Image (spheres, helix red, strand yellow):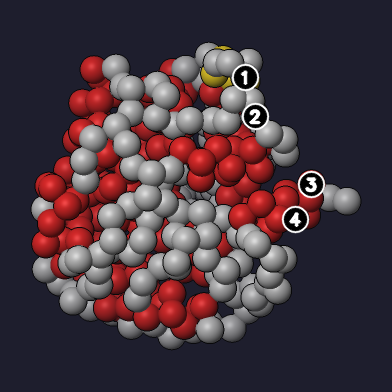
Amino acid sequence: MDTPIVALTLVVLLFSKSVPVFGTIDILPISYNDVNRLEFSLNLEFLAAEFFLYGSLGYGLDRVDPQLAKGGPPPIGATRANLDNLTADIITQFGYQQVGNIRAIANTVRGFPRPLLNISSAVFARAIDIAFGRDLRPPFNPYRNSINFLIASYYMPYTVLTGYVEANPNLSGSTFKALVAGLLGVKAGQDGVIRALLYQRRDTRVEPYNITVGEFTNRISELRNTLGRGGVKEEGLINVTTSLGVGGIRVSTGNVLSANIDSLSYGRTPAEILRIVYGTGNERRPGAFFPNGANGRIATILSA
């Protein structure tokens, strides 16, 4: 059986109580307006905000800017990470950048309450186990130290970034295009910083697993490609395929930025993104970071 099929089967069994019937891959386009697309991104902005804020400060939106959460339930399993001073400083900045991004979106569209988020160590551990095809012992804990937290952070900005890349050419209003361009710039910056910090440590072995940081990123990217079911739309930090690499030319075994053969950022549709953040490979089957599903019209349409 092919590796992607095995990985997807493991995802279904571990993240779902029953095996779901997968939805149709994006063959027919669904029409979303500018408001729908911008509101959809709020789900991912909330997720990254709470993860970064709690990880660096030990508290989240409900303390930093409660009105932005609009009464949504507090995240599950959120806790402060054991970070070194430099990482804590960077992640704190990311957290407050997320607050600003949510505020900018809320000032443009009505939005919705923060969805129920699960950012517990168990969710990350389960995803890592699936990525490696075996249970790591002890379970991976993103809050244990700086390297673990940065590996977990590898999940965050890039997922949002790909959504904005896909959305921007489909927007019609100049106000929305300008806002998404600004949001995309920040997400690209965050992702670049995270990848650079991890790339610096790419040969460092993550204890106690004796697995390198570079291998962790490769496995996570492979898992997201499998879950998204939209082809290869990201690569890890090391040993990327020759056809991708840096500008499609094999000049290094490294891959500090994720991009296509022309070094352009990949885009992912809302359905692909939900399959990834739900951890099920199915936009109709919530789980993982969104146990009750994402909010907004797009998520509602895709869940039908």
Which residue does the numbered mark 2 point to in the structure image? Answer: 136
Work out whether 201 lies above or below 7.
above
Q: Residue at x 35, y 76 (%)?
A: 296
Which residue does the numbered mark 3 point to in the structure image? Answer: 3
- Does residue 113 appear in this view? yes
Q: Residue at x 68, y 34 (%)?
A: 135
- Of tags 3 and 4, which is closer to the observer? 4
Query: Residue 279 vs residue 101: left or right?
Result: right
Marks 3 and 1, how far apart at CA: 22 Å
Lower sequence index among marks 3 and 4: 3
Q: Residue at x 51, y 41 (%)?
A: 122
Marks 3 and 2, how far apart at CA: 19 Å
- Of tags 3 and 1, which is closer to the observer? 1
Query: Residue 203 vs residue 21: left or right?
Result: left
Mark 1 belongs to which amino acid? Tyr
Work out whether 107 lies above or below 156.
below
Marks 3 and 4, how far apart at CA: 10 Å
Q: Quadrant of residue 166?
A: bottom left
Task: Kindly check if marks 1 and 4 are in contact, taking CB atoms under 8 A apart as contact.
Answer: no
Lower sequence index among marks 3 and 1: 3
Lower sequence index among marks 4 and 2: 4
Mark 2 belongs to which amino acid? Leu
Tell me the tag on residue 209: 1
The residue closer to the viewer here, 210 or 184, is 210
Which residue does the numbered mark 4 point to in the structure image? Answer: 9
Lower sequence index among marks 2 and 1: 2
Task: Kindly check if marks 2 and 1 are in contact, taking CB atoms under 8 A apart as contact.
Answer: yes
Mark 4 belongs to which amino acid? Thr
Marks 2 and 1, how far apart at CA: 7 Å
- Of tags 3 and 2, which is closer to the observer? 2
Give the crowd class for mark 2: few <14, some 14-19, many >=20 residues within 10 Å. Answer: some
